[in-house]
Image (tube, rainbow, N blue to C red):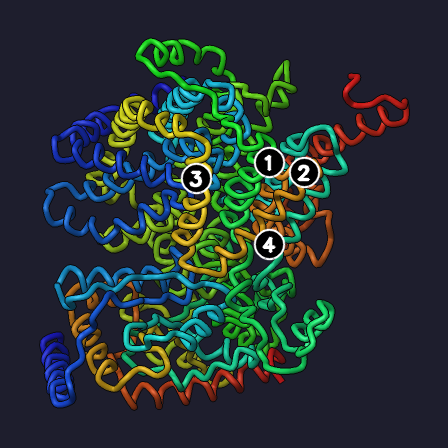
Amino acid sequence: MDIFAQFFDVLPALQQGIWVAVQPHNLALAVIGVIVGLFVGALPGLGSVNGVAILLPFTFVINEATPDPASPMIFLAAIYYGAMYGGAISSITLGIPGASTAVATTFDGRPMALQGNADRALVTAAIASFVGGTIATLFFTVFAPALSSVALDFGNPEIFALMLLAFATFIGLGGDDIPKTMFSIFFGLLLATVGFDTISGEPRLIFFNEREQTAVLEALGSTDAASSVPIFNSVGWFSRGIQFLVLAIGVYGIGEMLWTINESRYKVTMTETKISASRIMRGIVGMKDAWKGTAIGSLLGFFVGILPAAGATPGSLMSYGVSKMTSRDPKSYGQGNPDGVAAPEAANNSASTGAMLPMMTLGIPGSPTTAVLLAGMVIWGLEPGPRLFEDRPEFVWPLIGSFYISNIVAVLVNLAFIPLFLAVLRMPFTILAPVIFVLSIIGTYAAYDNMYDVWLMVLFGLGAYMLRILDYPLAPAVLAVVLGGTAEQKLRQSLLLSDGDFAIFYSPFFDRDGKGQEWWIAPITTWIAVILIALPIVVWGIRKMRGQTAADV
Amino acid sequence: MNLVKKLVLGATALGMVATATAAVAFEPSKPVDFVIMAGKGGGADKMARLMQSIVEKEGLADKPLVPTNKSGGSGAEALTYMKGVNDPDHTIMVTLNSFFTTPLRQPGLKVDSMAFAPVGRMAEDTFLLWVHKDEGISTFQEFLAEAGKRGNKWVMGGTGKNSEDNIVTDHLNKAFGLDIKYIPYKGGGAVAKDLAGKQIQSSVNNPSEALGFYESGDVIPLVAFTNERLPLFPEVPTLNEIGIGEPFAYFMQRAVVGAPGMSDEAQAYYTELFTKVYASDDWQKYKKSKSLMGDFISGSDLEDYWATQIERHEKILKASGAIK
């Protein structure tokens, strides 16, 4: 009942805020923002962070032109939302995740499209996004100040335990071949270590010094190994580390496409997709099959989203994993289960609203996009932080009001554009495949402004094609690259804190600061993760011993 | 006071215009590549985007500045990129102290900080020692006692290894016989959050990073590593004025540099441009609200400043064993 009381307390402020948000100029900004975001998000390589960063200077014009301090932020928040909706579009129609937040959407969205249900997948994604975004906004409205303290309770050991949980939830994603899945995860983790290390400040695996370069060239049989130094620009190639999108676009844009071409032997593989108002209606009605994924995604996404350093990507991955784990029919995941589209899509929208929370109440961005939003707020003369809600209600409430409005605008715009996105699928594959290759190259360059990353992307694509032929699951490698960097950093920061004692993760009684406090969050999370990881391995081991194959069960 | 400052600035700007027009005037013929040697969302990034928006808002340049983040390897990526650009007249960069330390620590990069064109120093960022209010500490002396008692259970969070924060922490440990444990983070925001959440016991954040939690009363500053008290924190003493140990002050440069090989005409153009940015109301307001110090310097003054900074950082890094 407390919750309702709290809700009614903020109701007048919210009402006022929504009123400001539906003023014609703010509504127009929301609509334009959503449309821009939708297309930015739909292009592989460009995500919400690019859209928001590119249009940041434009907000100064808005700031001068409108009387409301919230108007520029309403515009940027609308782009953010639009991009979250848009990310699903390329995941479903092209099979390339438009952004890291939409990786999990490809797992079932792509199979649905190949079965001729692209329209249904897109409708499911749009509605799940709407539900996720709206539920998160409701939470935001009621609990914002209270929840900000939850984020503060998550220190390094807690975040690492959470990352472990994220890995645990998708250990089953790779299919039944656990050794191959493990290989894929470890390969991803290895790639995640490339670059300059935050903790020691030293370069790792970048063939930085002359001796290493010479050794590599000698191993490759080069004759002029001892000559000109530096032999190749290793700093340019590797110093930023292996960026997630470089691997994801390589795997999905190049590797998968080559594999599809090879499998189909130049035959047209795209199934026909029809579109009509009645099919969209049927898609909306069909949402009842995906309510569970939507619910899991909305709740889990929001919670993971409010934790700084986590953000929408782990949120959507964990939601997919949990949805699959709790399903009565986990085998249907990966074959085009609408729940598998709804869970990550509800989660990434819910998480992006959640990520606004630490940004506004603590001044800590939970994702790269909110980092740019934060920079924007500073430039408009706002001080995001613990006092923002009290000091600047004339900014905060219209913005929250605009979250509700933007979500409604986004779902309507998205549904209206679905026929256009489906037109993509009607292109013959012989045209579509080259278009995807070109988009992959442009997208990689656009994301990082760097030709080295484009070459790396192509190399990964060719490598992924080989591994695909050998039947290795690649999704775990992509996920490991996304989470590996944060997980490793948090692991090592925690171990520095504990002088190398792993008890900091599993024991609530480990004394972190010499004051004898008890810490429960990390141990509980760790134990759940350990059980989840051990379970399938034990089951697999037992089956192996009994001489059964996995397919028999 | 402010008027005098503005007049002086105006005069400097005029002087710059005069020198610029005396030489063959340079105008960029295409958008200018504006490199940021840090990731999106950090202090350097915020500042660079503010400069870009001031240029745009006030219509100071015909061609836009296009920000590009090159965050790899504590600036290693940005520095090597700048060294290799084929159009140095259209490439400028926002720098911090990794401009000095990274070339010292990574001689393999073969980057010479002094080869960059000294466009202008926009400010010097300051460092303060922060603790959570629940520690029950309100003076530097109490901090020394408490941190000394807890030994290596007292944890300092900071941005990066061998970075500015690490240098200040090393100094505290050495000068006062402490055993504070330093944990490197990816950015100042994460450090501020973990201090507010009592995950760590202290930080040496820049004011811009800690301001939010200071205003909400979660964290308190104990001492400033500056020469004079900061106007924003008039009640906080400087380490020098407390008078324990050797005098110590430490700053972070916030400067704009041109790519090595930039022509004198282009350098004069950018110096004039950033003199105007510096003099703008928005920049002055930002500088004041974030407690930034330092006046605008450029040309040979900036080069002299770099030379002293490089010498000082070489000494500091040698003392801590980071370089031989």
- Identity of the amino acid at label 1? Asn
N-terminal-most mark, 2 or 1: 1
Which chain is disc 4 placed on? A
Examine the image and state in which quarter residue A392 appears: top left
Tell me the CA gap for discs 2 and 3: 24 Å
Q: Which residue is mark 2?
A: A469
Asked whether, in this view, residue B289 is left or right of residue A359, the answer is: left
**Residue A98, which numbered label?**
3
As drawn, A207 above or below B49 = below
For marks 1 and 4, the one nearer the N-term is 1
Q: Which residue is more in the foreground, A272 or B211? A: A272
Q: Which residue is mark 1?
A: A262
What quarter of the picture does the C terminus of chain A occupy? top right
For the residues labelled 3 and 1, the Cα–Cα distance comes to: 24 Å
* The disc label shown at residue A55, or none: none
Identify the element where label 1 is drawn: helix
Residue toward you, A188 or B124: A188
Task: Give neighbour class at mark 1: few <14, some 14-19, many 20+ (Cα, 10 Å).
Answer: few
Q: Earlier in the sequence, mark 2 or mark 3?
A: 3
Across and down, in percent, residue A487 comes to: 60, 48
Which numbered disc flags the more N-terminal residue, 3 or 1? 3
At label 3, the amino acid type is: Gly
Amino acid type at circle 2 is Ile
**Above or below, A122 relative to B139:** above
Q: Judge from the rendering whether residue A343 lies leftward or rightward of residue A157; answer left or right.
A: left
Measured in 3D between alpha carbons, the distance from the residue under mark 1 to the one under mark 4, in whole angstroms, is 40 Å
Compared with A177, A67 (above or below) is below
The one of A332 and B9 positioned closer to us in this rendering: A332
Residue wearing tag 4: A489
Of tags 2 and 1, the one toward the viewer is 1
Give amino acid for label 4: Gln
